[in-house]
Image (spheres, grey):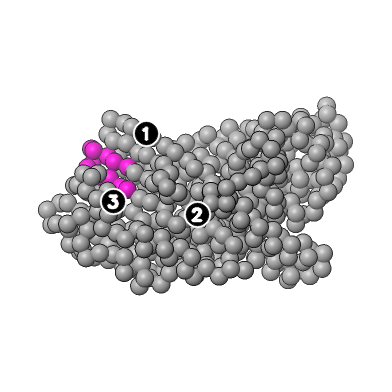
Amino acid sequence: MDFGKLIARAKNLMLNAKDEWPAIAAEPATTASIYRDWILVLAAIGPIAGFIGMSLFGFTIMGVTVRSGVGIGLAQAIIGYGFALGFVFVMALVIDALAGTFGGEKNPLQALKTAAYASTAAWLFGIVQLLPALSLLALVGIGWSIYLLYIGLPHTMKCPQDRAGGYTAAVAVIWFILSLILGAIIGVMFAAGKVGGAAFSFAGANGDSAEVTVDADSALGGLAAWGKEMEKAGTQMEAAEKSGDAQAQADAMGQMMGTLMGGGGKVEALEPSVLKGFLPDTLGGMPRTSFSAERNAAMGMQISEAKASFGDGGGRSLELEIIDMGSAKGLMGLASWAMVEKDQETSSGYERVRNEGGRMVHEQWNQDSNWGEYGLIVGQRFSVKVSGNGVDMDTIKGALGDIDIDAIEALKDQGVQKG
């Protein structure tokens, strides 16, 4: 997988689509290569952003902070990602089926290119899910993708330019209807207590050239190294496709998704007892009043978490949460690519998201409720977070100093099985 090419193409599609579409239409490709080199990577970022935004950060409205549970949040991300991969293929079938109606040429491979590359803008704008309050901006990306579809159809599907508008409108309407139906299905799954979630927005990055040199120690450098592992899995997928063996193809796809999720290999989350060992007897000068530690799995993905409550019996309390993303370690690595920042102040408090020394930091304070939270993403694998009621932010930040963060980070490669 060539990340330099991916970055350059994403930029060119957004800024110079009229020149990029002819190149896309003309280049050789296979279903496997389109998924491997474009869809699998970009389709993951929206679910990652949604998971981090809702399960780790949450959002505050009228003084109330809403946050999804980590377990259900991870399940939503995984299910949403799987549905997104399938949705692109379904839209390719629609594009191919409508080609003749609008004077175009039916071609399943070109139709998949059309669905994949026209989705680029929507995927890029999906990054706003890291900050749930800005999620409506994703609509801009959807509109931009419709424009990309309009520009691309005459090149990939060979439809006359004067019929591209009608072709685009027909595809967009079906896209919208199928999205509503799929969203309703997933909503019913969620309401019934089953894992589920829709995630049809994605993210990427831009750059200046197809020739990109990156620092191996930088976030993009780590992403490039991860891409080499994806390339190995993609080679297996290509071989499986040529063999015609359905089981081999399924196994190869599973291997590729495992590589994507785990950042280069399978990851076994830490034993709950290991995380429990980081829960101190006192935090911020307050004794521990309760704790829990557990490891859960969903669709083969493992996460572990340990939580503890601390209080002085006089209305002052702290909560500590340590989460090992385990099998989703690769997703956390990809999240570091975004380097999102936020600095918002209101009459009732503030919220800040920043990167410090390679660690994503989330800080939030509400003076009306006298509640605050301070959390870190450590080693691109662990979430360590302290929240407090009836205490000031200095106390919350100071409490994090009672945790051996460096020792937690030193475990980032434990349980990682390289492929």
Vertical comparison of 209 with 232: above or below: above
Q: Position of residue 78 (x, y in %)?
A: 55, 58
Question: Considering only order in the chain, which callout, 3 or 1, is on the residue closer to the N terminus?
Answer: 1
Q: Amino acid at mark 3?
A: Ser
The residue at 22%/58% (across/down) is 283
Please state if 58 lies on the left or on the right of 279 as rendered. right
Q: Identify residue for label 2.
A: 332
Q: Quadrant of residue 149?
A: top right
Crowd class of label 3 (few under 14; some 14 to 19; many from 20; radius 10 Å): many
Q: Identify residue for label 1.
A: 344
Crowd class of label 1 (few under 14; some 14 to 19; many from 20; radius 10 Å): few
The mark tally for this picture is: 3
Please state if 216 lies on the left or on the right of 355 as rendered. right
Which residue is at the front of the view, 29 or 129? 29
Q: Residue furthest top?
A: 162
Q: Which segment is the magenta one?
A: 364-374
Q: Identify residue for label 3.
A: 387
The residue at 21%/65% (across/down) is 281
Q: Position of residue 28 (x, y in %)?
A: 83, 48
Q: Secondary structure at mark 2?
A: helix
Q: Separation of disc 1 and disc 3 at Cα?
A: 19 Å
